[in-house]
Image (cartoon, grey):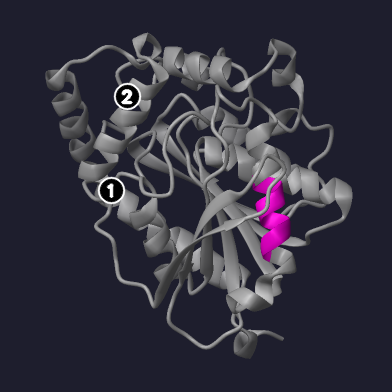
Amino acid sequence: MPLDPQARKLLDEAAAAGGPPLCMQTVEEARQGARDKAAVTSLSPEPVARVEDRCIPGPGGDIPVRIYTPAGPGPLPVLVYFHGGGWVMSDLDTHDGLCRALANRSGAVVVSVDYRLAPEARFPAALEDASAATLWVWRNAASLGADPSRVAVGGDSAGGNLAAATCLWARERGAPPIAFQLLIYPVVDRDFDNRSYHENAEGYHLSRESMIWFWRQYLAEEADGRNPLASPLRADSLAGLPSALVLTAEYDPLRDEGEAYAARLREAGVPVTLTCYQGMIHGFVRMAGVLDQGKRAIDQAGAALRSALPARRDRG
């Protein structure tokens, strides 16, 4: 279908503002641009019952996290969330509005993880932090007012990559037992030549050249791109992984790999729901402050989490 009018307006405004493409910017310029964009496109922060910033132990030092606890009797389900930004940009603040909304819509504690960024810390540093944070949340669920049997992981874009890879990591180790994965236009393969990469190569917020740039920042060696923990679509098997909601966008270079991952999950016997938001561009969920379909996607994600991680009184 045609590009959504709200998305078109956003793209036109960005084009009128000018500026160099991402691949021509310094890392700090890219990070500042992400912060600036989040300030004007993100959802306004909703009140939640409690918000706490703290640090938890990680393999490369303390990992900052932000814990959002919604109203309601505990113990609650818990979602460990990894922000997008190409493994290079964004932080707890750029995704604050999204995480607040997810906590309120899902009724789950949301633990947002400020993992180490590339290129200062390349693969597998971000995944090491993501998996360590998930393990910590599971082991310390009671102190968060959460139920260790109802742990989910989720993320958008590069954060979706970390969520998917964390599920693979946990499956191989037998812990923690992840109950659900929320994958929002996830990066799941280092492959720039599928149909959506060429159809949406430029002009739709995320470009093919930007993705090439992100992968160059993230990987220590090009061969790492074949590692399933960097490219989960390349895993030999997806059997035994947690049920999933996969959201994609029609005008997104990452559309086809996200949909291919959903198909492989389904073929492996994993319950999965796939929704492609027609007329939408990459990043539309985090830009829900100006894109109505982003709000609808957050509502869908919240409902999916409630269904997959029901309150104790609703179980059995």
Is residue 23 something one can see in this rendering?
Answer: yes
Q: Residues within 10 Å of mark 2 (few under 14, many from 20)?
A: some
- Residue 120: which numbered mark, if any? none
Check disc 2 and report its element: helix, strand or loop. Answer: loop
* 293 lies left or right of 119: left
Q: Amino acid type of disc 2? A: Tyr
Q: Give the mark, 1 or 2, whose residue is nearer the N terminus.
A: 1
Which residue is painted at 57% across and 62% down in the image?
A: 79
Which residue is painted at 61% across and 17% down in the image?
A: 191
Which residue is painted at 62% across and 49% down in the image?
A: 62
Is residue 274 something one can see in this rendering?
Answer: no
**With respect to residue 68, does 14 lie above or below?**
above
Residue 136 in magenta stretch = yes
Q: Residues within 10 Å of mark 1 (few under 14, many from 20)?
A: many
Query: Where in the figure is residue 32, as x and y percent of width and height?
Result: 31, 30
- Front in this rendered view, residue 23 or 209: 23
Q: Residue furthest right?
A: 173
Q: Which residue is mark 1?
A: 42
Which image quadrant is residue 267 in? top right
Point out the frontmost of discs 1 and 2. Answer: 1
Total numbered labels placed on residues in the image: 2
Q: Which residues are magenta?
A: 130-137
Q: Which residue is mark 2?
A: 204
Residue 170 in magenta stretch = no
Which residue is painted at 40% across and 71% down in the image?
A: 104
